[in-house]
């Protein structure tokens, strides 16, 4: 009888340990679940912000596309052929802005004299590295 009683005590003690461990794990799961919900909320908000920025960028791109269509007919045939040839070769843009003496098409440094001439905007200059037509305009953003 004493043996069975000691076995029951051991089993009850083991059950108590298991219950304590279960409660500890339940609390850990609750903490992790709460953190996941917080992180999920922050990520959803960030995603919405990024989607809004993407829509703004797409709208700006559409405006630029419209401007391009309005400007192209006013260019000389020689310049239009040069632009079309570069655009066909590069695929994304035939012209690139110059910022701090760096071509924004290929991110190569442009010689200072070339950069100065591009800023004057009175002749067509191309990037020595990528061949895009270099233009200069200040970004208003």
Image (cartoon, rainbow, N blue to C red):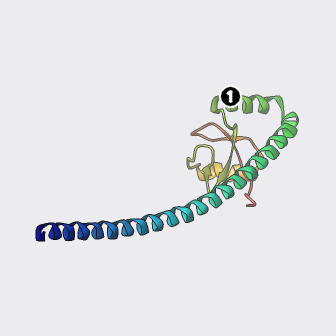
According to the image, label 1 marks what residue? 88
Q: Give the camera-side residue of 13 and 22.
A: 13
Label 1 crowd (10 A; few <14 / some 14-19 / many >=20): few
Residue located at (70% from left, 37% from top): 94
Name the residue located 78 percent from the left edge and 33 percent from the top edge.
79
Closer to the camera in the image, 97 or 77: 97
- Foreground pick, 118 / 46: 46
- Horizontal and vertical percent for residue 100? 62, 57
Residue 31 rendering spot, x and y as whole percentages: 46, 68
From the top left corner, tell me how far across and down residue 139 is, in percent. Answer: 73, 58
Report x, y in % for residue 59.
79, 48
Residue 6 falls left or right of residue 39: left
Q: Nearer the viewer, residue 33 or 40?
A: 33
Secondary element under disc 1, as helix, strand or loop, is helix
Residue shown at the point (64%, 55%) measured from the top left: 47
Q: Classify the position of the N terminus by image quarter.
A: bottom left
In the figure, is residue 138 to the left or right of 114? Answer: right
Residue plotted at (84% across, 41% down): 66
Position of 130 relative to 33 (above/below) = above
Q: 90 above or below 31?
A: above
- As displayed, is residue 137 above or below residue 126? below
The residue sitting at the front extreme is 1
- Residue 125 placement, left or right of 80: left
Q: Which of the image's four quarters has the C terminus? A: bottom right
Please count the marks in the image: 1
Classify residue 76 by image quadrant: top right
| Left or right of residue 76: residue 86 | left
């Amino acid at each position: 009888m004493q043996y069975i009683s000691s076995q029951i005590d051991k089993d009850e003690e083991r059950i108590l340990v298991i219950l304590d461990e279960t409660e500890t794990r339940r609390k850990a799961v609750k903490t992790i679940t709460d953190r996941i919900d917080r992180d999920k909320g922050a990520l959803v908000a960030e995603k919405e912000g990024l989607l809004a920025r993407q829509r703004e960028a797409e709208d700006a791109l559409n405006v630029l596309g419209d401007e391009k269509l309005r400007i192209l007919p006013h260019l000389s045939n020689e310049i239009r052929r040069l632009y079309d040839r570069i655009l066909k070769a590069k695929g994304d843009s035939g012209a690139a802005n110059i910022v701090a003496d760096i071509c924004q098409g290929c991110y190569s440094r442009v010689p200072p004299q070339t950069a100065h001439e591009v800023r004057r905007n009175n002749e067509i200059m191309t990037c020595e590295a990528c061949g895009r037509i270099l233009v200069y305009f200040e970004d208003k953003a």
